[in-house]
Image (spheres, rainbow, N blue to C red):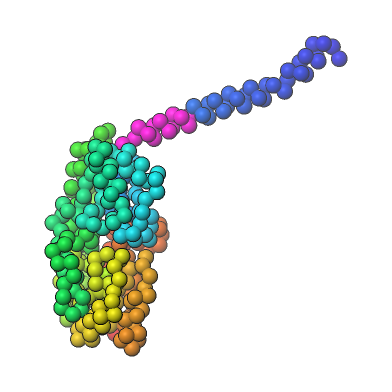
Amino acid sequence: MTERNRAARTRAPRRPHTLLLALLILVCAGAATACAHRDDRPRVVVTTNILGDITRQVVGREAEVTVLMKPNADPHSFGLSAVQAAELERADLVVFNGLGLEENVLRHVDAARALGVATFEVGRAVHPLTFRAHDGGGREEEAGQPDPHFWTDPDRVREAVGLIADQVAENVDGVDGGTIHDNAARYRKQLAGLTTWMEKSFDGIPRQRRALVTNHHVFGYLADRFGFRVIGAVIPSGTTLASPSSSDLRSLTRAMREAGVHTVFADSSQPKRLAEVLRTELGGQVRVIELYSESLTEKGRGADTYLRMMRANTTAMTDGLTGD
């Protein structure tokens, strides 16, 4: 073997390494560019998944929307990781329900606001009702406190959509305000159609049977908008973090007997043990029907958008209150 061939054979293995290095440089450069592009995108961070879906309908592709609450979670008790807390502080706009709903998250929202992040408390902006949390014995719990569950009234959601659009257009640099408001107008039409459909569906429930008993007090806005009576709740409070006493349960069962109510609506993401207690108390004559009241589900699970959630709930309530 000549010296020339021996040298060529010695150098040949180095060529793949050179090509691999070049490819790695290109990949890393591309990733850095992608990451830089991602970091440059305007960000809207939303606390709850119901508001997250609503906000995404408004924002469309104009900004990145990050939703902190996972599907099937409880808004009263879910918490944030350190990474999620940092997301709030890097946001261009934080959209949150407020009125005390996200009990473990509000301090992080306050911290982001203190750093200069724009925040929008949707619940306070849509004329909140005060709790009329009847415990079944004629008392009202938390009288005077605002009820955070405004989304059970689609008309208030329609109002919220316009307000969110205004906040995004004003506070998020780089978005097209015209597109944002066009998205909002399109979604508001769908919400108006939802209200009309719900009214027609509820027309099939006789007035005397429009009585609600739920896991906790969550449907005050729906009751006010569509003419229902709230008989009481298993947990006589607006938060799932409270607990009922034995006297609370006795008062509720008495009120249910007097009103002739045999249906309890329990949130699908909450344990139904307390609702099942009522079945025992009333001799097995109570039906427990699941609703999607405070959280969306995973995609394809029946309530993965606000519109589908409200339609599913309307159907379940109508069937539950008209069936024998």
The one nearer the camera, 71 or 242, is 242
> In the picture provided, is 146 more to the left or to the right than 318?
left
- Residue 96 rendering spot, x and y as whole percentages: 26, 50
Residue 278 x, y percent position in the rendering: 32, 81
Which of the pair 82/310 is nearer the observer? 82
Residue 177: x and y in percent read: 21, 38
Q: Residue furthest top?
A: 3
Q: Quadrant of residue 239?
A: bottom left
The stretch of residues the image draws in magenta is 30-44
Please check the rendered image and state whether residue 260 is part of the magenta-colored stretch, yes or no: no
Residue 198's quadrant in the figure?
bottom left
Horizontally, residue 260 falls left or right of residue 53, namely: left
Magenta stretch secondary structure, dominant: helix
Q: State which quadrant residue 321 falls in.
A: bottom left
Q: Is residue 115 above or below residue 247?
A: above
Mark yes or no: residue 63 visible: no
- Residue visible at 24% across and 68% down? 237
Name the spot of residue 73 as percent of width and height, x first: 37, 59
Q: Magenta includes 38? A: yes
Q: Residue at x 18, y 43 (%)?
A: 166
Residue at the image position 28 percent from the left and 74 percent from the top? 244
- For the C terminus, the image quarter is bottom left
